[in-house]
Image (cartoon, rainbow, N blue to C red):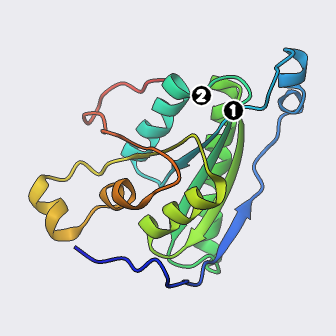
Amino acid sequence: METVREDVVEEYSWRDVKVPTLASQSQHGKELGERRGGRDILVAVDHGPKSKFAFDWVLAHLCRTDDTVHLIHAVSSVKNEVVYEMSERLMEKLAIEAFRVAMVRTKARIVEGDTGKAICKEAERLKPAAVVMGTRGRGIIQSVLQGSVSEYCFHNCKSAPVIIVPGKAVGGESLT
């Protein structure tokens, strides 16, 4: 296992994604007479089914009115336009679904670099109520030999609880 030095400051690159904002989103909490703002929930996403299942789980079990879901997707380079555009489309699709299913706001950020470290840095920046991610479903031996993003975040995200959502079986039903 790699030892992480806390005093080392690494370069951190990102690009915010402009996700669709629906007209009633900005007024939703005001119309209901909410006393306070909602929570921030950080969800790590990628293009895989386990990530989508974790996102669906957040909408079904964790979100409530006036929360903001912060989507984060780590890539090798934010300057690669093809990768950025594919990630942007994913974020837009998830943002629309988040509003349609749970009526929550969504913000999105595509970050460059090591996935686990990027997620922990975003969690430190946002101080969310929770950090949620899926798991690849590897066996214990593969995870030990190759490492695991969810395991890294579980041990290194100090600013919020980490919720690791186990993936569904292939062909299983979605939660939403």
Residue 112 location (% of width, % of height): 56, 74
* Above or below: residue 167 compared with residue 30: below
Residue farthest along the top direction in this orientation: 32
Tell me the quarter of the picture where residue 50 sits: top left
Residue 35 location (% of width, % of height): 82, 21
Q: Tag 2's secondary structure? A: loop
Residue 28 location (% of width, % of height): 84, 23
Q: Mark 2 near mark 1, Cβ–Cβ under 8 Å?
A: yes
Q: Nearer the viewer, residue 144 or 34?
A: 34
Q: Residues within 10 Å of mark 1 (few under 14, many from 20)?
A: many
Q: Residue at x 51, y 32 (%)?
A: 58
* Above or below: residue 151 compared with residue 137: below
Q: Residue at x 78, y 55 (%)?
A: 18
Q: Calculate the distance from the C-alpha at mark 2 to the C-alpha at mark 1.
A: 6 Å
Q: For this view, does 156 lie left or right of residue 2?
A: right
Q: Which residue is mark 2?
A: 63
User: Which residue type carries mark 1?
Assistant: Asp
Q: For this view, does 117 lie left or right of residue 111?
A: left
Residue 103 location (% of width, % of height): 71, 25
**If the image is split into quadrants, where does the N terminus sit?**
bottom left
Q: Residue at x 39, y 58 (%)?
A: 153
User: Which residue type carries mark 2?
Assistant: Cys
Q: Which residue is mark 1?
A: 67
Q: For this view, does 140 lie left or right of residue 20?
A: left
